[in-house]
């Protein structure tokens, strides 16, 4: 169980710290690391039985990774975030 003093924002900041040198963060990897670091309260199993991250954490993560050096886009087909490329269109989804 997660400690009461840990906020979704703190978990999101941890996620940002986990962005690899190549500028990517896989959802599955992030969820497993969150479970180990903060407990089960910030993750869940989705319909496909993959690990997911609760919406409150994802909302904070989006705030931290929109614009600036950590501007990320979501690659739905492979379930990961990556740094925005100059060729990416506006918005959060990679196309």
Image (cartoon, rainbow, N blue to C red):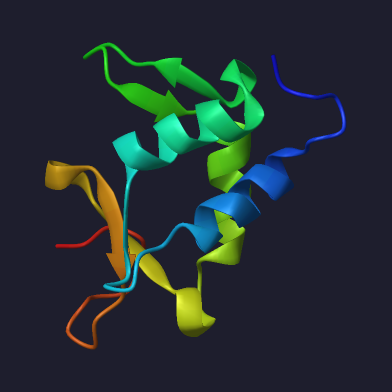
Quarter of the image for residue 55 reads top right
At x 51%, y 23%, the residue is 43
Q: Is residue 95 left or right of residue 90?
A: left
**Residue 47 at x, y percent in the picture:** 27, 11
- Rendered view: 48 above or below 53: above
**Residue 14 at x, y percent in the picture:** 60, 52
- Rendered view: 3 above or below 34: above
**Residue 20 at x, y percent in the picture:** 35, 65
Which residue occupies the extreme right position in the image?
5
Which corner quadrant holds the N terminus? top right
Q: Nearer the viewer, residue 14 or 92?
A: 14
- Rendered view: 56 above or below 95: above
Q: Is residue 2 left or right of residue 30?
A: right
Q: Is residue 54 visible?
A: no
At x 51%, y 69%, the residue is 66
Q: Is residue 85 left or right of residue 46?
A: left
């Amino acid at each position: 169980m997660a400690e009461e003093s840990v906020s979704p924002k703190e978990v999101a900041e941890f996620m940002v710290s986990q962005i690899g040198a190549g500028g990517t963060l896989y959802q599955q990897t992030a969820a497993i690391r969150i479970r180990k670091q903060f407990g089960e309260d910030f993750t869940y199993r989705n319909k496909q039985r993959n690990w997911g991250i609760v919406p409150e954490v994802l909302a904070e993560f989006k705030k931290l990774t929109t614009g600036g050096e950590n501007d990320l886009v979501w690659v739905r087909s492979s379930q990961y975030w990556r740094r925005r490329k100059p060729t990416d269109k506006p918005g959060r989804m990679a196309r």
